[in-house]
Amino acid sequence: MQDLKKFLFSRVNMTEEDLTTVISYFRPKVLDKGDLLLKRGQIASLYYFLRSGGLRFYYDEDHELTAWIVQPGEFFTEISSLSPERTTRFNIEAVEHAELYCISKKDMEVLYKQLPAWQEFGRKMWEGMAIRMIDEIIRFQTMTVEERYLEFLKKPGFMQLVSVKQMASYLGITPNALSRIRKNLR
């Protein structure tokens, strides 16, 4: 769990003793490509740190829509399900072999009460997530599809995580439209 320790130390100042306490609450989880971490209709109860691999949140009503992509080194949950304890609208799928560490909502609450540094960690994680969501909304409203696609190309490893179909749905276009964009950019 060295990578999780490194991640936590990079986000918040905590003692080695506090870090050992925090780490003791995490459990490893492994998913193969195509496995679901959370299935539509379930209620989220865990927070996760993605150690390796890649995940995507997708909505599957009339057609599949990739709503979020998780890369290694991210701490996340399905907050629209976890906090109000209601069923999720999303499936969370491993887009390749994935290794995660998970911690329950209940254990997060215990740590929040015990450790001021963990409260700071939680606050910083949600601030970061809010900023990412705002940035995504602004990009969607102000950039062309081509510009958004070029932004994704700048993210190391991002394009290797998802198929053309999944990337197209994330951009809000058809796979054929994405293929034309890619062809024009060559």
Image: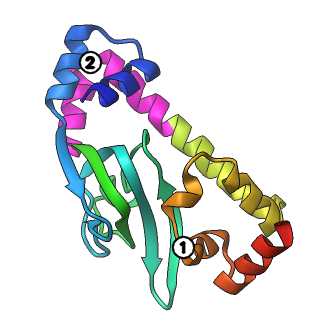
Q: Give the residue at x 35% y 17%.
A: 117
Depth order, front residue of 39/124: 39
Question: Which badge, 1 or 2, is on the more N-terminal residue?
Answer: 2
**Residue that numbered label 2 is attached to:** 115
Q: Give the residue at x 73% y 53%.
A: 151
**Residue that numbered label 1 is attached to:** 166
Q: Amino acid at mark 2?
A: Leu
Left or right, 10 with reference to 180? left
- Is residue 19 located in the magenta-colored stretch of the structure? no
Q: Which residues are magenta?
A: 105-126
Give the CA separation, mark 1 to mark 2. Answer: 40 Å
**Main secondary structure type of the part rendered in magenta:** helix
**x, y percent for residue 32:** 26, 63
Q: Residues within 10 Å of mark 2 (few under 14, many from 20)?
A: some
Depth order, front residue of 112/174: 174
Depth order, front residue of 155/77: 155
Q: Give the residue at x 14% y 27%.
A: 24
Q: Amino acid at mark 1?
A: Gln
Tag 2's secondary structure?
Answer: loop
Tag 1's secondary structure?
Answer: helix
Classify 133 as above or below 107: below
**x, y percent for residue 89:** 39, 73
**x, y percent for residue 22:** 22, 25
Q: Quadrant of the N terminus?
A: top left
- Is residue 111 located in the magenta-colored stretch of the structure? yes
